[in-house]
Amino acid sequence: KKEAVELVKRGLMMDMRSHVCWHVYGLLHRSSQNYAEAIKAYKQALRIDEENLQILRDMSLLQIQMRDLIGFKETRLRILTLRPNSKVHWLSYALSVHVNGDPDAAVGILDSYFGTLEEGCVEFEKNFESSELALYKNQLLSET
């Protein structure tokens, strides 16, 4: 572990603008359970490469773990705007809005997601995954 930290620091001295070095530095901090420093390193990496989905995902996981709900919501929105064609990003953003105390907006996000789907797609079939999504939407509706 010490060797990894030394190598990352040496990499940063060679190129402070390397998003890869900052990301790895954040991963090392996370593995040491130094979560605040990990988030700082992820943010630095994102200043260099704003659209890196892996860094954004790692940061969002750490934000929800640290209960930084507002940061989690902002990060999930950034991810959704980068990849709006992915179901998981829509659901994650709806969840982030929900945990921030706005179930009405979360329902609206789910409705927007359903509006992007074409008729006859898998989401409209009766299967386990779509029933879980319907259950979640009903839970949100009961909270409004």
Image (cartoon, helix red, strand yellow):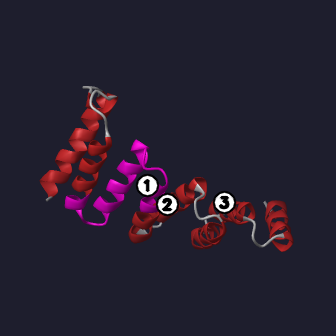
Q: Residue at x 19, y 49 (%)?
A: 139
Does the CB distance between marks 1 and 3 fall below 8 Å? no
Q: Which residue in the protein does label 1 denote?
A: 80
| Amino acid under disc 1 | Leu
In depth, the one of 102 and 35 nearer the eye is: 102
Q: Give coordinates of residue 4: x percent, y percent.
A: 80, 60
In the image, residue 55 sits, relative to residue 46, either above or below, namely: above
Say which label, 1 or 2, has the lower sequence index. Answer: 2
Q: Residue at x 28, y 59 (%)?
A: 98
Say which label, 1 or 3, has the lower sequence index. Answer: 3
Does 97 lie within the magenta span? yes
In depth, the one of 113 and 135 nearer the eye is: 113
Q: Quadrant of residue 94?
A: bottom left
Magenta stretch, residue numbers: 76-105
- Labelled disc at residue 60: 2
In the image, residue 127 sits, relative to residue 55, either above or below, namely: above
